[in-house]
Image: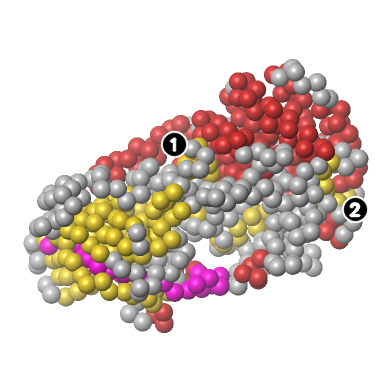
Amino acid sequence: MKYIYGKQDWKTFERGEENCCLMTNGLGGFSSLTMTGSCGRNDHAVLMACVHSPNHRYNMIHRLEEILTVDGGQTHISTQDFLGHAGREEGFLYQTKFTYEDYPQWTYVVKGVEVVRTIALMQGENTVGISYEIDNRSGREVTLEVLPHLQFVPKGCLLTREQKFSIECGKENVYGKTDACGNADACGKISAGGKSLYFQTNGRIREISTRFRDDLYYAYDACDGRTERGCTAVNHSVSLTLKAGERNTLWMVYGMSPMLPGMEEIIGDMESHRGRLREQAGFDEEIPQALSVGAHQFISCRASTAGQTILAGFPFFEDWGRDTMIAMVGCCLAVRQYKTAESILRTFMSYCRKGLMPNLFPEGKEAPGYNTVDAALLFIIAVYEYYRRTQDAVFVRSAYQTMAEIIGWYQNGTDYGIRMEEDGLITAGQGYDQVTWMDVRVGEILPTPRHGKPVEINAYWYNALRIMQEFQRLYPGDEKDYGELADRVKANFERKFWNEETGCLRDVLSGTKADQQIRCNQIWAVSLPFSVLSPERERQVVETVYRKLYTPYGLRTLDPADEEFHPCYGGEQLERDMAYHQGTVWVFPLGGYYLAYLKVNGYSDESRKHVRRQLESLSAALREGCIGQLPEIYDGENPTSSRGCFAQAWSVGEILRVYDALR
């Protein structure tokens, strides 16, 4: 799916920063700029390298300053804002096109000179390629000079003027000559803060005495109360001069290894990699094709486990257990990446403790964090979904003991107040521990305290029991009666959670007013493979969720009629956290809604047609925010602009599950 934007999309500087692009390298590193080429966030970067996968990231090249000289007159084609808007670079005024398919391209026309910038990221390497195709029809000599603005600091940190930068170049400072290290594969090396960045280019390198600029302005951090300013350093430029009527390409490659590929190799790698993903996924519609390659952007290796994992979202989040288990079904299984799914499941199996799966993986000497009630139950459901598609009984047998241990610990009790009560239902949460996905805590404030028996957790629990009942035929040594317990859970679930007055399910059984709130969590009691409700009540849940919570871009987390409903998400951290699960629209539950709708309508042709028609709205969503991606959240009242992470794994994964069900 090729996304094409024109000058109408950046009528103002601010409009031009509304949308960005994303490329990832499978290590946790990425490249992301706005569609006008600026950095609207601290976390934007030409090269965000990952030195220890997947979370130890360094913002190496933050942005590119580009100056086109035509007959002595200089014009910035780069775009960047600064504090107070002083000296703002306004290259967007000369920009005529932005396109994104497998990689982004920006086109500029200045005084008869056309420049097409391409940026591409190499898979499996911290390497970025940048090229400028220049068509000089000005009738005069022209020079394009590119100044990479460097940071060499951990992601999210601020560069200071105390940082020392050094550069080593080949004797003649041109491509093809041996550099100062005697390495013919790189014509330069930049060092700072204990990190080195190698580069090669066909342009002329000019060394510059390091100069800093510490007044970069990030509009998309300022509006969320994050640090609004940034600092960069420049210590070299790369340039190419063209005669009148000449066409030529300036290119440069930067990477953390001295053995660098060429620009054409990087481009070819991206095209073939994404082409294979589309082919393997096997969708014949544009939206799921786009999402299938977008899904892979979240897949990363994890050095601490020597396996693969799923990053929850860009640019903020790391790999979390709950998010991974939810996202994996769509991001791996729905796109037929079965080996990746198996690797992720095995990684989680190795870290299962006391029946719990890690919510956060260990980094260095840190211990894993297990503060999640749903990840372990979702693991069992994910294994079931994996088996449904692969019939891999060998893997199920290898995972069976882990799944049986999960059931046992949940029955008898484990950490964080997680235990089965006499009625067979699961209760969870204690003190200030937030263990469901609505897990915000602000000091001693719990905006959504769901201690007790959460509705979706008990739906997961019931499905886990039915799955174990089915898997017993593959592991006959286990004589436990999962079916009998499942029957008890089902009877008590429907009796205790059903709210006749509202025609839907209570959100939690806690003895507080939260029990009566209408929230999106109930949709998973319908969408899961094993039905815990009668068909008529399933239908009522779907209809209530549609009337109260549905939007084309996601489900509201709270009924707008509720006194605690927050219509907008934004502002300082406290303000955002108080709104996060109090009406804010989340994309990922929309997948559960559509699956539930199909289920209660018997997957009829008419219901399939209806869902396809509803999903067409996502075509617009893919063009907004992060191009080709789905975001984390939208405002609750009027969901028009994406908020939070501009690319979210479980948002993409859950919509892919729907398209997979529609095949």
Whether residue 493 is visible here, answered yes or no, is no
Q: Is residue 483 visible?
A: yes
Q: Which mark is residue 501?
A: 2
- Tag 2, which secondary structure? loop
User: Considering depth in this image, is 402 or 594 the residue closer to the camera?
Assistant: 402
Instruction: Bin the neighbour count of mark 2 within 10 Å (Cα to Cα): few under 14, some 14-19, many 20 and up.
Output: few
* Residue at image point 35% right, 53% down: 104
Magenta region includes residue 229 = yes
Q: Disc 2 versus disc 1: distance between alpha carbons?
A: 47 Å
Q: Is residue 596 magenta?
A: no
The mark found on residue 278 in the picture is: 1
Residue extent of the magenta highlight: 221-241
Relative to 95, 153 lies left or right: right
Sequence-wise, the earlier of marks 2 and 1 is: 1
Work out whether 574 lies above or below 269.
below
Residue 588: image x %, image y %?
Answer: 63, 49
Rendering coords of residue 350 (x, y %): 60, 35
Three-letter residue code for mark 2:
Glu
Which percent across, then down, holds residue 263? Answer: 25, 47
Q: Residue at the location (83% across, 25% down)? A: 481
Binning the other alpha carbons within 10 Å of mark 1 as few (below 14), some (14 to 19) or many (20 upward) gives: many
Q: Which mark is residue 560?
A: none
Q: Amino acid at mark 1?
A: Arg
Q: Quadrant of residue 11?
A: bottom left
Quadrant including the C terminus: top right
Local secondary structure at mark 1: helix
